Amino acid sequence: MFTIDRRKFLTLAGASTASLIAAPHVARAAGGKVVVIGGGPGGATAARYLRRMDPTVEVTLIEANKDYYTCFMSNEVLSGERKLDSLRFGFDGLAKQGVKVVHDLVTGIDGAAKSVTTKGGQKFAYDRCIVAPGIDFNWSAVPGYSAEAAEKLPHAWKAGPQTTLLRQQLEAMPDGGVFVMVSPPNPYRCPPGPYERASLVAHYLKHHKPKSKVIILDAKDAFPKQKLFEQAWAKFYGFGTPNSMIEWVPAAKGGKPSEIDVAGLAVKTEFDTIKGAVINVIPAQKAGKIAFDAGLTEGNWAPVNKGTFESKKVAGIHVLGDGADAAVMPKSGYSANSQAKVAAAAVLAMMKGAPPPTPAYVNTCYSIAGKDHAFSVAGVYTFDAEKNAIAEVKDAGGLSPMDASAEDRKREVAYAESWFRNITHDIWG
Amino acid sequence: MIPSTIHRLLRLAALVGAVGAASAAGAQTINAEMLANTCAGCHGVNGSSKGPATPTIASLSTDYFVMSMKDYKSGKRPSTVMARIAKGYSDDDITAMAKYFQSKPFARPGQMVDAAKAKQGKALAKKYCESCHEDEGRIGEGVGVLAGQMLTYMQYSTADFVSGKREMEKRQKAKFDALMKEQGGFEAFDPILHYYAGVK
């Protein structure tokens, strides 16, 4: 009995703690209409957290697709460790939270009239609009490549049918075949992603087609987590020896592709023509189409106020995730998730004419490079109002150490899986 | 025992009240909810993890939460990623997050555990663990909450304690030593952890 009483007291103390800490938000008035465009990690998180922070706000999420396939963890589908279906998330969880989910394609946002129009002829009025446009490809960046060419030489940089196609090609590839990857110039979605992909493709080949090889043709001279990847490649795939399964060709050594020969299954560079049994072209990237159509972009990305994610181009519209220019934060699912929470809190405050709360942002990103072998990069960020900048907290964050034990590398695999389960639940419910 | 616990809780409530008032006073003050939101990606919605390895941090005592973060920061407690993340938060940030998560319920939907092991572990836990991890490990006054905690996480923690990578309190060390001596070594933890992981 005594323990139950004590637990009751703990619960009571807990309840009072919650209300006291939440004191700055008590003044939330009812009402307000927010339209969220895009149901990926950024948009879905924003919609959920708006409702979570203020159940009186009316939130409509407009997303063209019935399901979303996460890009993160999709390299594990390529290596056969995971089924594509495990990356599929629907929107029932959002609907349960009181978000009105509309499956339609947004064709225009009128910032002056504060309304959103769709391909299906629907029109939605808003007090504030949140756009999570994701990415689109600069198809013309490398001559020869196009949306049609991607049906033969997949990019697989948006998960779904493209992932399946690349997996099928890998499975059909003969032993001894060359897997050629074209890695994009900065900035792009998931900066360490191409190198994780190279690792996991090599992992698959090592066990199923050991005479095969992975060649990365890179538009860059360096890449994220490079030393950690190279250490893992040396450990698992003979990197640094003449028999290495992975070859990385940086821009300085002619890695930059000049043309994709779709019919001939080859990539031309300054010095060479590299033929592949399977060619994976990850094109240069820009913000998703709606960001351009709505006049939210400058160059390839959408400039924003970093404390609120309100567009610098159109008032009343907030842009977050991969499509926004959030500078130091990498274009990752966790960044989008974290930015969405900051934006949701800002939107609620601004609708009431209150100052937006002080932001806090985070990113952690795992890469799996081989069996029981993962490492991470982390960043904790604060807002520098004077510079309108997201600033990484000094001495915090950074990479997994090079000298980590095998046990720690293995634990990071388990933490990567935990991250996937928890963040997808946080995003889609 | 009862008065002291209640006294401690009252003191905590008073402390939290003070923080709440301070937050309301200025715009650039600590926003516990905003800070806590950064944890959810790995530790789950409201701090209750879906596992398999990241622990639930909901309902942890503020003492234990603060101590853990400070020990991660200093390197006293080993970690893969938490040292790098903990360094991103000030002591005041950490205190605010601790209070936020202390107020959240520990979700215990039940984990896949070995029922036979759990049964065996229950008896061992009573003898070796219950004096600090009270009420089937639901209460963690200055210690971790074990009831329903992620099995993989508890296995990591136990391994770190026994290997000496993570420091043990005197009383804990005595219990660990006794368990391993009397019950057949490190393997004896396994049924205990299955038991605690399965508590709903």
Image (cartoon, coloured by chain):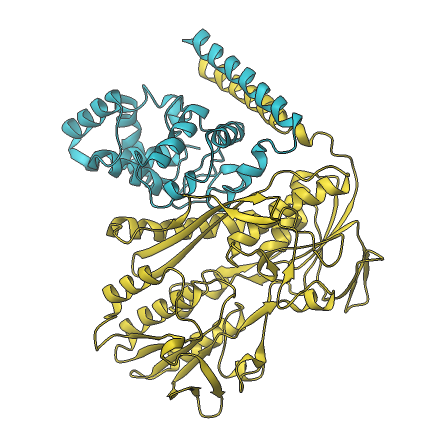
Chain colours: A yellow, B cyan
Q: Residue at x 69, y 52 (%)?
A: A310
Instruction: Let me know if residue A429 appears in the view.
Output: no
Q: Residue at x 36, y 67 (%)?
A: A200
Answer above or below: position of A117 versus B73.
below
Q: In the visual, does B96 lie left or right of A243?
A: right
- Most distant residue in the bottom direction: A264
- Count of picture labels: 0
Q: Residue at x 61, y 38 (%)?
A: A358
Rendering quarter of residue A56: top right
Most foreground residue, A290 or B41: A290
Instruction: Let me know if residue B29 appears in the view.
Output: yes
- Most distant residue in the top direction: B3
Give x and y (percent) for residue B158.
Answer: 27, 36
Most foreground residue, B165 or A40: B165
Rendering quarter of residue B193: top left
Rendering quarter of residue B73: top left
Give x and y (percent) for residue A407.
Answer: 26, 49
Most foreground residue, A350 or B129: A350
Q: In the visual, does A38 lie left or right of B142?
A: right
Q: Residue at x 67, y 50 (%)?
A: A95
Give x and y (percent) for residue A231.
Answer: 27, 62
Q: In the visual, does A92 lie left or right of B63?
A: right
Answer above or below: position of A116 versus A349.
below
- Most distant residue in the right direction: A113
